[in-house]
Image (cartoon, helix red, strand yellow):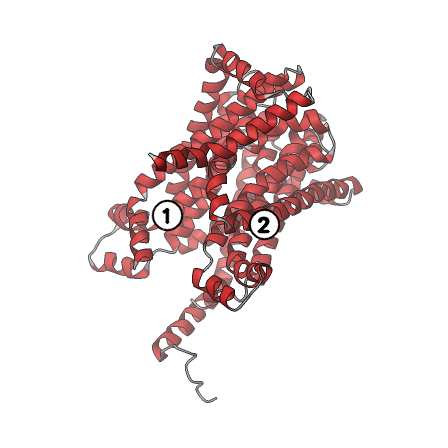
Amino acid sequence: MTTAPPADGHTVTTTVAIARARTRQRSYRPRRAILGATGILIVLLAWEGVSRSGIADARYLPPPTEVIPRLFQVLTIGDFWIAVGQTLGAWALGLGIALVLATVLGVVIGLSPFLRRFTNSTVEFLRPVPSVALIPLAVLLFGLRIEASLLLIVYAAFWQIFIQVLYGVADVDTVAMATGRSYGFSKWQRIRDIVFPTALPYLMTGLRLAAAVALILAITAQLIIGTPGLGAEILKAQNGGQYSTMYALLLATGFLGILINTGARVLERATLSWHQSVRGEAVQ
Amino acid sequence: MKKAVVWIAFTFGLPAILISLWWIVTAISPNFFFPNPGEILVPFFETWFGPRLWLDVLPSILRFGVGVVIAMVLGVVIGVVVGLNRDLRSLTEPTFEFFRALPAPVLIPPLLLLIGPNDAMKIFIIALASIWPVLLNTVEGVRAADSVQNETSRSYGIQGFRRVRFQVLPGAAPQIMAGIRQCLPIGLILMVISEMFNTTAGLGFAIIQFQRTFAIPEMWSGILVLGLLGYGVAVVFRIFERRILRWYHGLKDLENAS
């Protein structure tokens, strides 16, 4: 095989360094997977030990050898999947509403220095308000309906995305905007072709943070208000004294969280494959 | 003088408009669930600056503070230890990812069984929920330490605690502060909802109690207290961050200016 010329701009030394780093990473990979699995095993063994030895009441903390089979049983029950669907439904709907509201308002307010200054104090005050403070209001207005969850989810997720969009719009290159204007871009064209690509990495960061927060709030609403979903099922299992089911549902909720986090990261990479931050990561 | 007027107009303009709008709408069509702002302000002072300040507000804030400080200290310590060792990082990564992804409120029912509805359980759940952003950001910040700095430390024989104190921690500080910023709202959420199960005191309990007894203006004033608390926490964090990352912001400004 003939040696390829070094990639654009790279000296031979950097190319060699990158190749070395890659092989080092590749040879570490199996070790990493084994260590990771060992870590999980250690946690499970510790849990089993605590439960069997009686350090914690085995009634209240059943060992994993009881909980994990229970999890597989739960997975075959239709009601479980309905609860998962309700949780994911509230999550997706809330996140979607927050995304649209935050993007539109973020771009409109971000593009106008006047509006940005005018809304700043209000935003800074409303943003840190914990959305769980709205639980009593949600109960009064909507009772056990899904809107109660939505109020909490939208409020929490909105600020995460909105703030990032504001940062993103503020990051737009003034020269690029001026160039667009001199070439006779319409306002809409400028937003689509200059503002949007600049703000997209920020928007995706906001969306990733908001996705996790939205799940927390969806589960919280179900636990506290009792809107249907996984949270309500966990509470039901606890009240009914079915503790291994409660822990099985808890594990399932964790896996749902991992699924959402991974999904958000994959989406971020896919939509930003053209962006420096993602392209740069491949070479290290 | 003119500058001050403009600043006041910009800062209080929108809040004034929103509050007057609320006032006008509730005056035209009174709604049981939405009292007018004046009706909220009276119980705000009557309710929260009496015995409730000592029974509900301060204990809640104290639990939040203790929980979050435990999370920060443990998060940074464990994060540095794990971040400095590649094998330890691989060992813990999947487990940490699981706990980070797990929505912390689901841990309240089992902790109620195991610890009981007391202060220890509430502080524990606040710390347990807010440790993950700090811990994982510290690991990431320590891992991504500048290799030139690492090698400089090694050549000068700076090792162990001194290396952590003078090279690793300052290098990771911006990332650690980002983690702390994420952990504060989570701690606040857990502070409120841990008080909504089997308890008889605390801010979270109080606002649910007002809602159940249809004491609507008092409920709104409770929401206002939580809002002010959230705002206060954000302000304290910003002062704290400015102090700790003063060198970093200075560096950034220099880079931006050049």
Q: Is residue A93 visible?
A: yes
Label 1 crowd bin: few (<14), some (14–19), many (20+), radius 10 Å: some
Amino acid beneath label 1: Pro
Q: Is residue B125 visible?
A: no
Above or below, B119 against A262 in this view is: above
Q: Identify residue for label 2.
A: A103
State the residue at coordinates (62%, 33%): A220
Amino acid beneath label 2: Thr
- What is the secondary structure assignment of the residue under circle 1? helix
Image coordinates for residue B107, horizontal then vertical, percent: 58, 33
Q: Foreground: A192 or A74?
A: A192
Q: Nearer the viewer, mark 1 or mark 2?
A: 2
Could you confirm whether marks 1 and 2 are on the same chain? no
The quadrant of the image that shows the C terminus of chain A is bottom left
Above or below, A254 against B211 in this view is: below
State the residue at coordinates (55%, 20%): B221
State the residue at coordinates (44%, 70%): A22
Q: Foreground: A116 or A280?
A: A116
- What is the secondary structure assignment of the residue under circle 2? helix
Q: Chain of mark 2?
A: A
Residue extending furthest right? A78
Quarter of the rendering containing residue A130: top right
Q: Identify residue for label 1.
A: B174
Above or below, B119 against B13 in this view is: above
